[in-house]
Amino acid sequence: MNDPGSNVARHLRIAATDRPDGLATKSPTSVKPTGEVQHEVRTFRQLDQESDSAAAYFAEAGISEGARVLLAVRPGHDLIVGMFALLKLGAIPVAIDPGMGWSAFLDCVRRSRPTALVGVRSASLLSRLPFAAFRTLSHRVTVGNSAWRQALATIGRPARPIAHAQSDTLAAILFTSGSTGAPKGVCYTHGMFDAQIELVRSTYGIRPGETDMAMLPLFALFNPALGTTTVTPLLDPSKPLAADPAPLVAALIAEKVTSSFGSPAIWSKVADHCEVHGLKLPDLRRLLIAGAPVSGELLAKLRVVAPNCVTHTPYGATECLPVTTITADELLGEARQNALRGQGTCVGRPVSGVEIRVIRETDGPITTLAEARPLRARRDWRNHRDGPQCDPRV
């Protein structure tokens, strides 16, 4: 019997077994003149079977266990299928934000040294240009063409074995956006993904059967493990300011979305659209906004637009997320007044199971935690669990 160990792809197999007919993905196909968004639907069983078929397709193309694979697929069903297929193979997906710019993107590719590419046709063509970053590529698989669709249609076989992985086995390399400095490649192990899934589940009370609209594509990959339906939004996540909020709001309402994770830029557009057109989001229960500072004005507006929703602003980084969290109600209270007095932005309390230490700044790199020199915290920071603190100083 196949033992996947700690391979995070096992969560999809579990969902396909426990909730085979539960809806896994809703991918937009078109927008009607009325503004209604049409979706293509897949169940957990279908998603598991399609990712099995994709894994076989990748293996036939020469992608093997341990291979680093540059994943250049648009957000949606194909991205989720491709990611889980690679994880099932034991390959290592490399995900890079295309919005960081061509030069930074090439630098990230060069540093990650992928040996294969799984991407849309334009990405496959670009990878054949004479750039040094692409010299390590020896296998290319195009997603979205007729061969890909035919491969995914080859279902009904026995479930494909999932590659065995330890908790410390490298699972994926995810690059930060570079919004606060040079983009960094973060090495995620299967154990790290497991810990994140459990943290998100327990911290925010996410339950199987909910419907999530992931405005940040990589967070959609947690949903099969959480047993929730993923509704892919009609937007380019690398250009949030160019997003048309009308189809986003239409889908949020029609699909009865209960949870969403997105940036302040996107949710500002959604809130403004709802305000102008007198629309509400009554089914939204939980909203996570992160990636940039969240204004009090936006939080106040969302209270009106989504009257049954609790808005959270988690804090962390690609390397470690979430670290702390705080609700809009807290932020709009005393914390907001403290921020207006120049005491910093409140990032909330550490989530359960997370320990925070402040270390001394150094001029050079810190290669191991053993080299870090923790600073002795002041009283207000030591007592942080009694209440959220604003920008702790040591």
Image (cartoon, rainbow, N blue to C red):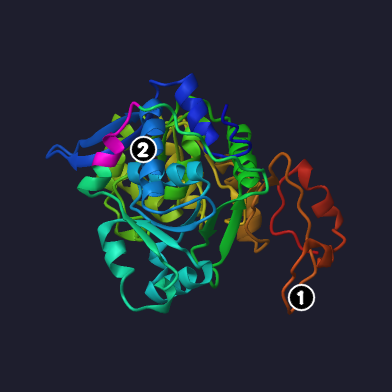
Please give the name of the residue rendered at 37% of the width and 28% of the height, measured from the top-left corner: 157
Which kind of residue does numbered mark 1 sit on? Thr
Q: Nearer the viewer, residue 246 or 147?
A: 147
- Compared across the picture, whether 341 is left or right of 38 comes to right
Residue 149 x %, y % = 25, 42
Q: Amino acid at mark 2?
A: Ser
CB under 8 Å between callouts 1 and 2? no
Q: Is residue 115 visible?
A: yes
Task: Give the image quarter of residue 121.
Answer: bottom left
Q: Residues within 10 Å of mark 2 (few under 14, many from 20)?
A: many
115 over 188 or under it: above or below: below
Query: Horizontal placement of 88 versus 170: left or right?
Result: left
Residue occupying the point 82% across, 47% down: 383
Mark 1 residue element: loop
Q: On the rendered image, what quadrant is the N terminus found in?
A: top right
Q: Identify the residue position indicated by label 1 in the image.
A: 362
Residue 185, numbered circle: none
Q: Is residue 369 rendered to the left or right of residue 261?
A: right
Residue 270, image x, y percentages? 35, 46
Residue 215 appears in the figure: no
Assess disc 1: are there few (<14), some (14-19) or many (≥20) residues with their C-alpha within 10 Å of its C-alpha: few
Query: Any magenta on residue 151?
Result: yes
Q: Is residue 371 above or below residue 315?
A: below
Q: Residue 33 in the image: x percent, y percent?
A: 12, 40
Q: Which label sits in the foreground, 1 or 2?
A: 2
Give the labeled residue for mark 2.
53
User: Which image quadrant is residue 78 in?
Assistant: top left
In this picture, is 145 found above or below 180? above
Give the extent of the magenta segment: 150-156
> Marks 1 and 2, Cα distance to the nearest angstrom?
49 Å
- Tell how many labels: 2
